[in-house]
Image: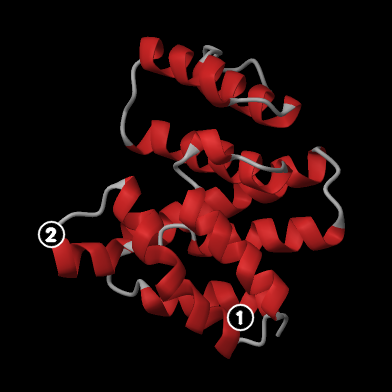
Amino acid sequence: MDTLTSLCKAMITYDQGDPRRIHHFLKVHAFARQIGIEEGLNEKTLFRLEAAAYVHDIGIHEGEKRFGRNDGMIQQELGPGEAKPMLESLGFESDDVERICWLVAHHHSYGSIDGPDAQILAEADMLVNQYEDGAGRKQNEALYHRLYKTAAGKRIFEELYFKEYEAGSHA
């Protein structure tokens, strides 16, 4: 079993009994991988992005236990401490662990985006959050203009939130 598959399995176990969280990280991973491939990320950057997508919200349960909340700042604060031992136990290299934990610690801090992996993780997470949170068109438009920079992320966002579904048009 490769390390990303092992990480996915470990995260499902970590979040067992919480299907909402499991569905969330699986969807974020799928969008992150798709955008990363379309944007031509190199193998190492794509690997780190995919791993970060699996563990990006790992601080949620600890935040709920300690503080009774799980907002983005709590996720960023507690996430790296939860992710690091998991990544290390699965044999991730130390430079990969460092970058993945940095991505977890900054995935809601859009002003700190420092590379394509951070940009894509933020975009993928928000593609899913907008749906799960039931954001309206006005909020979607503001987010689209503020956050989305990649061609693939913009295209997916537009297709999800700005296009009207037409029954029978894809037959």
Horizontal relation, residue 6 to residue 79: left or right? right
Element on which disc 1 rests: helix
In space, the residues marked 1 and 2 are separated at their CA atoms by 30 Å
Near-viewer residue (51 or 29): 51
Q: Which mark is residue 6?
A: 1
Near-viewer residue (50 or 65): 65
Task: Give residue 58's quadrant in the image.
Answer: bottom left
Q: Type of residue at label 1? A: Ser
Report which residue position mark 2 lands on.
68
Residue 109 in the image: state x and y as whole percent.
Answer: 47, 40
Q: Type of residue at label 2? A: Gly
Classify 135 as above or below 31.
Answer: above
Indicate which disc, 1 or 2, sits on the residue closer to the N terminus: 1
**What residue do we see at 67% from left, 80% from top?**
92
Residue 136 in the image: state x and y as whole percent.
Answer: 34, 17
Q: Which mark is residue 90?
A: none
Element on which disc 2 rests: loop
Horizontal relation, residue 103 to residue 58: left or right? right
Classify 132 as above or below 59.
Answer: above
**What residue do we see at 44% from left, 42% from top?**
108
